[in-house]
Image (cartoon, rainbow, N blue to C red):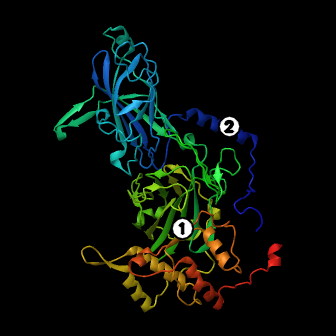
Amino acid sequence: MNGDPFCYKSSVSFHFDERLMGSIQILVFCLLCFASSTYGYDPLDPNGNITIKWDVMHDDQNTQVVRVSIFNFQLFRHVEQPGWKLTWNWTGDEVIWDMTGAETTEQGNCSAFKSKQLPHCCDRQPVIVDLLPGAPFNKQVANCCKGGVLSSMTQNPSKYGASFQMTIGSFNASVNGTTGEALTGFPQNFSIGLPGYTCGEPLQVPPSKFIEDRGRRRTQALDTWNITCSYSQFRATPTPTCCVSLSAFYNDTIIPCPKCSCACQGQPTAKCINPGELPPVLQLHHNEEPQPVVRCTPHMCPIRIHWHVMLSYKQYWRVKLTITNLNFVKNYTDWNLVVLHPNLKKVTRVFSFNYKPINQYGALNDTGIFYGIEYYNDMLLQSGKTGNVQTELLLEKDTGWKFSFGEGWAFPRKISFNGEECVIPQPDYYPTLPNSGPFTAIALPLSLIVLIAFLAKRRNSNGVEEWDMPTLMMLLLAISLFMSKKGAQGRYLCSSTVVEPHELAEMLSNRYPGLLIPKKFNKSEDELFYDFNTSKLQALGFTFKSIPEVFTDCIPSLVEQGHLSLSPPPSSAESSN
């Protein structure tokens, strides 16, 4: 097929008459008039927001002691480094005399003060940042010093809040030495300093209460205000930041991310690095989010999620989920992935990821959040061989729905990474079922069943035999692939190695010049890799060959059996042409 396989042109056109166009203009005008510029809405987290709580703990005419708390009441969207930056505008002549648990980025002009101790900040619009972990003990307060990072409520409920305390006073009273000027105003124009967030007006609420002495005593603030900040992805970034590719065991076609999902190659703001090139040396600022430098791909996204329908059993089906980081300048700490699919209420097992359902609409359990295991894969490293994390899902076939692999039912309806919705291919391009009829279960010989039982059983710490599900699933997959080639004979061995398509193609081309090895991988994107993982079988005492040794026996055997034709290598004259 000629042309760019990732580019599609629509032949659909629309025609409007003048009356219909006028009605559309009126509707758009009404939507713009009634739309709020403050609040955002996410149907997967309709009540999510960041709340700033302002508690007045002490007030004595000229000074106030205020405790400020920031709570991330969002189910899956968290605050990453460099963290929050809280700002507001003073409405009076206030200054910040002292602050613990946080600090202002600028002290401001305090030259009017002639005392030995200057205020912590004299700016009319202070910018407050969280202290870093390991701050001096005398500068800490409870729930502080996380570098501005806030976890989501689902991933880590103990780290979704931050607090600091400050003493504020009157500028004129402090300079002139007068008394009796009470602080009656309240700050305005709050901002959390994060892309996509807009804060509303302060709202006075019932005073906060605090527990002391192990719950035996309760105290409360003098006054409390809440400021609610909502998120909008449209305000956060003009373009998406992730995309989804799809594949299935019943179709050889891999549906790539839509072209230009996040950017297009050649755009001035799109920086990318071709395979084989070294990334440039960049000077990154510790308090600013670095601009993405991604691998050159047709979609140009920093994050790619691949959803692969692996197998179908009698009562279950299996999915492999891979998240690949194509960004050379960023590691994603405490990443998460939210998936919308109607069969998620029947999740039986999730390997190597944490999983929690998100139930926002009663019994409708079709959304779940995946995130890494702490100290194992909770950090998605920058682009490279280790820049990916993957899991497998085992789902029970939902009898309440008409289960089918047809019409793209097995693919997700919506996916978001770190709270940002990803671009998914159009349903018209989903892998389709073959015309060969329904799938049938594979009948295994008795000898294979005995081998599976031997390899897939182990003894736990209590000495009781139990099934090793990952090994069992891996063996069943290998046997099913072997038996699908009914004419093939012999032993097929693997190597416990991770290899990219470019490396595999180069090795095969050098060793077997007669094989027609593709140089470019248009249907399967360059960043995919083949994982020949036999670590669990190696632990049982099996020895495996290297990848070149595997093909030493495999290629001639397939040629001899007639499954592969080996053309003679081109002559020197042909090569020169």
Residue type of the residue flagged with mark 2: Gln
- Residue 492 appears in view: yes
Among the two numbered marks 1 and 2 on one chain, the one whose residue lies closer to the N terminus: 2
Residue reaching furthest front? 572
Q: Residue at x 55, y 35 (%)?
A: 35
Mark 2 secondary-structure assignment: helix
Is the residue 376 above or below the residue 102 in the image? below
Res. 25 mark: 2
Residue depicted at 62% across the width and 50% down the height: 262
Q: How many marks?
A: 2
Q: Is residue 398 visible?
A: no
Name the one closer to the observer, 132 or 449: 132
Q: Quadrant of residue 96?
A: top left
Q: Nearer the viewer, residue 153 or 23?
A: 153
Q: Is residue 403 above or below residue 17?
A: below
> Which residue lies under the disc numbered 1?
308
Q: Position of residue 399 (x, y in %)?
A: 44, 70
Horizontal arrangement in the rendering, residue 14 relative to residue 534 (left or right): right
Q: CA distance from mark 1 to mark 2?
A: 43 Å
Give percent across and percent down for residue 119.
37, 20
Left or right side of 321 for 137: left
Instruction: Label 1, secondary structure: give it.
Output: strand
> Does 297 sit above or below residue 485?
above
Mark 2 residue crowding within 10 angstroms, few (<14) / some (14–19) / many (20+):
few
Q: Position of residue 77 (x, y in %)?
A: 45, 47
Q: Pointer 1: residues within 10 angstroms few (<14), some, or many (20+)?
A: many
Q: Amino acid at mark 1?
A: His
Mark sitting on residue 432: none
